[in-house]
């Protein structure tokens, strides 16, 4: 046997220990990354600090100052080790003290068994497949910038993660374009994520520049509108792009509702040659009430399938994208524009969860009821509002979003969507819109009462509405009724002017031709 064929057991053992240390280091740091994401750390510096300190162990009672220390508190660090040494690969940074943390082979293992084990491990190392996950690079990054298609309903909030971002990039900038290659580009940045926007502070109809936030490199857009449809790019201030999205916000105007209990079926699929237009439904919401008959629904968005789509847009299903996607040619998009989003509703009945009986003030009230009349105790927080007679009112459920299961009650009467959903009756004065808001047009005295709000099957709040008829209500152009009155007045005046001009033109023509009798007005 030649010298080159002799097995170097020390080198094999050292390589085995290094591989075990590298695998342990990966598992430890990956667990630290997932733990940091669950804790929602506010900055990337804290996130990285948690990952780099994942090898530290807490002190125990037996660890005393000056005592004999048999276990290293920080077995992955050595004196004189710098930050760059920690960040390098384990095979370059591994030192002798790190190897002390690994268990040594049992003394009883024979040399033959050790040799066989090391030789088998080296042979199988070439066939080893290790599935490792990186939270920043879990999505494969194409060499050419692609667009990931995503569809939402209007008034919803959505989040776009920044995939393919290198770990050395500490801040990102989002860009928005209405059309690919457009000269008008919006730069969406909130000072490296230090300015946070809450959904409860966003007003309906406000500009997108005040309805977004960047958290952990992800873009959050609140109360999205159809005008927000377009292309979103994640990149840096220097114009380097990592990932892009093709976002389609479908309008809820004209949204069709079908009631499953009445035997109504959703829209049938449309076929125009190779174009297939259909509706994709989300999951059913939970029952919006408990203890009484409630309702649950699911939202359906418009999708189409065609082989003539642009190959630059990624599809979850081959040749399938949302109807408003930029991957759809203009001709095909025109053919699918009449396929509107749908809302399917059905009845449900679930029991309420048992809650513990509260003690304290209710107990005092119960005792006081033996002496006199028992005072009224609200079960949920009640907000009082005074509304002028004849003016409109919109009530929103606290913390509710369009995708939540929200229900409304007036005193002891349930306001079911079967009768109060917008669009069921054109002459509705009280209705619920697709954003789960309760509308009262031209408030009347009969509208007085307590309106309870249910969210995800739990009654969470109440609004006590009072209607007043006295007092002068100041007119303002911000009032919808005032704007409607002004518009109707101007339209009527314009119509009178047009009719007057047409009559004068006709008289002038008749006078010139001499074919009209002399009619004195």
Image (cartoon, rainbow, N blue to C red):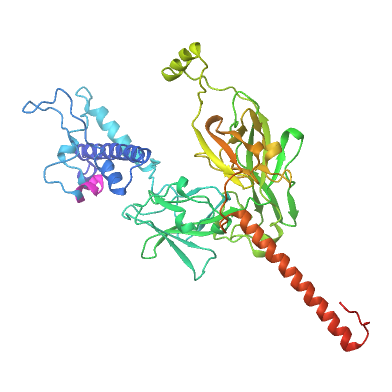
* Image quadrant in which the N terminus is located: top left
> Where residue 141 sits: x, y (%)?
44, 54
Quadrant of the rendered structure where residue 34 is? top left
Which stretch is magenta?
Answer: 84-92
Query: Quick check: 499 above or below 171?
Result: below
Marks counted in the figure total 0
> Where residue 300 sits: x, y (%)?
64, 45
Quadrant of the rendered structure where residue 174 is? bottom left
Q: Is residue 90 magenta-colored?
A: yes
Of 268 and 123, nearer the camera is: 268
Of 36 and 157, nearer the camera is: 157
264 on left or right of 153: right
> Where residue 321 sits: x, y (%)?
61, 53
- Label the magenta part by its dominant secondary structure: helix
Give me the residue at 74% from left, 51% from top.
Answer: 270
* Image quadrant in which the C terminus is located: bottom right
Quadrant of the rendered structure where residue 313 is? bottom right
Query: Quick check: 141 above or below 346?
Result: below
> Where residue 489 sits: x, y (%)?
69, 63
Of 107 and 444, nearer the camera is: 444
194 on left or right of 263: left
């Amino acid at each position: 046997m030649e010298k080159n064929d002799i097995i170097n057991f020390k080198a094999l053992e050292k390589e085995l220990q290094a591989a075990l240390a590298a695998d342990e280091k990966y598992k430890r740091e990956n667990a630290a990354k997932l733990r940091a994401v669950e804790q929602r750390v506010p900055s990337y510096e804290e996130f990285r600090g948690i990952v780099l300190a994942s090898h530290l162990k807490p002190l125990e009672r037996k660890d005393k100052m000056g005592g004999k220390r048999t276990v290293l508190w920080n077995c992955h660090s050595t004196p004189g080790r710098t930050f760059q040494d920690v960040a390098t690969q384990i095979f370059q940074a591994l030192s002798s003290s790190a190897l002390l943390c690994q268990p040594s082979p049992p003394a009883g293992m024979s040399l033959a068994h050790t040799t066989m084990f090391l030789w088998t491990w080296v042979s199988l190392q070439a066939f080893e497949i290790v599935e490792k996950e990186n939270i920043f690079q879990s999505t494969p990054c194409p060499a050419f910038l692609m667009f990931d298609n995503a569809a939402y309903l209007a008034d919803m909030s959505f989040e776009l993660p920044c995939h393919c971002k290198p770990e050395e990039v500490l801040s990102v900038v989002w860009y928005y374009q209405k059309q690919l290659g457009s000269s008008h580009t919006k730069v969406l940045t909130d000072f490296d994520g230090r300015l946070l926007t809450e959904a409860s502070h966003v007003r309906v109809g406000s500009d997108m520049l005040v309805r977004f936030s960047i958290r952990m490199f992800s873009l959050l857009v609140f109360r999205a509108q159809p005008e927000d449809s377009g292309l979103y790019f994640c990149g840096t201030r220097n114009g380097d792009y990592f990932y892009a999205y093709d976002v389609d916000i479908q309008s809820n105007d004209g949204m069709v509702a079908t009631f499953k209990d009445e035997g109504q079926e959703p829209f049938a699929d449309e076929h125009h040659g190779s174009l297939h237009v259909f509706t994709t439904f989300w999951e059913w919401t939970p029952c919006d009430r408990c203890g009484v008959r409630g309702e649950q629904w699911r939202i359906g968005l418009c999708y189409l399938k065609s082989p003539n789509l642009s190959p630059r847009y990624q599809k979850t299903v081959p040749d399938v994208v949302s109807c408003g996607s930029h991957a759809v040619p203009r001709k095909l998009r025109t053919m699918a524009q009449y396929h509107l989003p749908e809302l399917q509703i059905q009845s449900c009945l679930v029991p309420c969860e048992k809650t513990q009986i509260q003690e304290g003030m209710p107990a005092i009230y119960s005792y006081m009821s033996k002496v006199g009349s028992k005072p009224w105790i609200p079960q949920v927080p009640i907000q009082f509002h005074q509304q002028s007679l004849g003016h409109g009112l919109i009530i929103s459920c606290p913390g509710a979003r369009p995708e939540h299961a929200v229900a409304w009650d007036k005193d002891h009467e349930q306001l079911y969507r079967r009768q109060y959903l917008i669009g069921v009756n054109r002459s509705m004065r009280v209705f619920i819109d697709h954003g789960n808001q309760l509308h009262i047009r031209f408030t009347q005295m009969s509208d007085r009462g307590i309106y309870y709000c249910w969210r995800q099957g739990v009654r969470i709040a109440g609004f006590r509405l009072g209607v007043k008829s006295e007092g002068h209500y100041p007119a303002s152009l911000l009032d919808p009724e005032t704007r409607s009155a002004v518009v109707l007045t101007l339209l009527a005046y314009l119509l009178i002017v047009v009719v007057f001009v047409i009559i004068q033109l006709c008289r002038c023509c008749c006078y010139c031709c001499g074919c009209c009798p002399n009619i004195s007005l």
